[in-house]
Image (cartoon, rainbow, N blue to C red):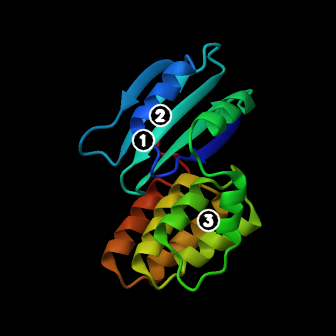
């Protein structure tokens, strides 16, 4: 089963996103999330029920993104790329490879969410640097996004952050991420 995540650009209006989904004739399956939850998730399926589309609004990550699962996902990915403003592969690659003195927390979120399903050394190195950041917000976003990415190679990095951080909030966040590690939060 294939899985891809596409990060929706911040300025893309929710109303246009809803209309796009209606025009695709995707079936609404369910909505999950409450006012107190960190995520609002709309689950949709293609007409042939071969592909499931999750539209996620993650309040903690401050990001909206799609998770597309099933086979074949390519037509759904192409439809989303042509009808919704999502970060392109080249935009993500530029963010990944950009050398900046200060990393923006939202850059960490975008790159992390767009990472491949399986381990990739470039993305791993980027997330490793974000986890080692002196900027508390960058490190927090990196911890949260590592939980979503779920590569086994990231777990020791989270354990190091938890063991060495002097910030009680970051320790608690990392402990929570480790407890939920490997479970994509859907």
The answer to whether 89 appears left or right of 144 in the picture is right
The answer for how far apart the CA atoms under marks 2 and 1 are is: 6 Å
Give the image location of residue 52, x and y in percent: 58, 27
Give the crowd class for mark 3: few <14, some 14-19, many >=20 residues within 10 Å. some
Q: Tell me the quadrant of the picture where the N terminus can be found.
A: top right
At numbered mark 2, what does the secondary structure look like: helix, strand or loop? helix
Vertical order, 185 against 120 (above or below): above
Location of residue 111 by image quarter: bottom right
Q: In the rendered image of this protein, does residue 104 appear above or below residue 32?
A: below
- Label of residue 69 in the image: none
Tell me which label, 2 or 3, sits earlier in the chain.
Answer: 2
Residue that sits furthest to the top in the current view: 48
The image position of residue 29, as x and y in percent, is: 46, 20
Classify 10 Å Cα crowding around label 2: few (below 14), some (14-19), many (20 and above).
some
Q: Which mark is residue 154?
A: 3
CB contact under 8 Å: marks 2 and 1: yes
Q: Callout 1 environment at 10 Å: few (<14), some (14 to 19), or many (20+)?
A: few
Q: Quadrant of residue 115?
A: bottom right
Provide the secondary structure element on which disc 1 rests. loop
- 89 relative to 136 in the view: left or right: right
Where 167 sits versus 89, above or below? below
Q: Which mark is residue 13?
A: 1
Name the residue carrying label 2: 17
User: Quick one: 174 or 69, which is closer to the camera?
Assistant: 69
**3 vs 1, front mark:** 1
């Amino acid at each position: 089963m294939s899985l891809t995540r596409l990060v929706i650009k911040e300025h893309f209006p929710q109303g246009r996103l809803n209309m796009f989904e209606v025009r695709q004739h995707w079936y609404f399956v369910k909505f999950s999330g409450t006012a107190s939850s960190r995520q609002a998730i709309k689950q949709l399926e293609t007409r042939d029920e071969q592909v499931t589309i999750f539209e996620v609004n993650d309040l903690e990550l401050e990001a909206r993104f799609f998770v597309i699962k099933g086979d074949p996902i390519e037509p759904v990915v192409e439809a989303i790329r042509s009808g919704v403003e999502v970060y392109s592969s080249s935009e993500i690659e530029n963010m990944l490879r950009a050398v900046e003195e200060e990393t923006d927390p939202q850059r960490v979120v975008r790159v992390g969410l767009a990472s491949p399903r399986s381990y990739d050394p470039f993305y791993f190195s980027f997330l490793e640097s974000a986890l080692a950041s002196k900027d508390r917000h960058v490190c927090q976003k990196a911890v949260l996004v590592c939980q979503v990415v779920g590569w086994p190679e990231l777990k020791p990095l989270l354990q190091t952050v938890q063991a060495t951080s002097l910030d009680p909030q970051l320790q608690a966040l990392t402990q929570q991420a480790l407890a939920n590690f490997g479970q994509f939060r859907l």
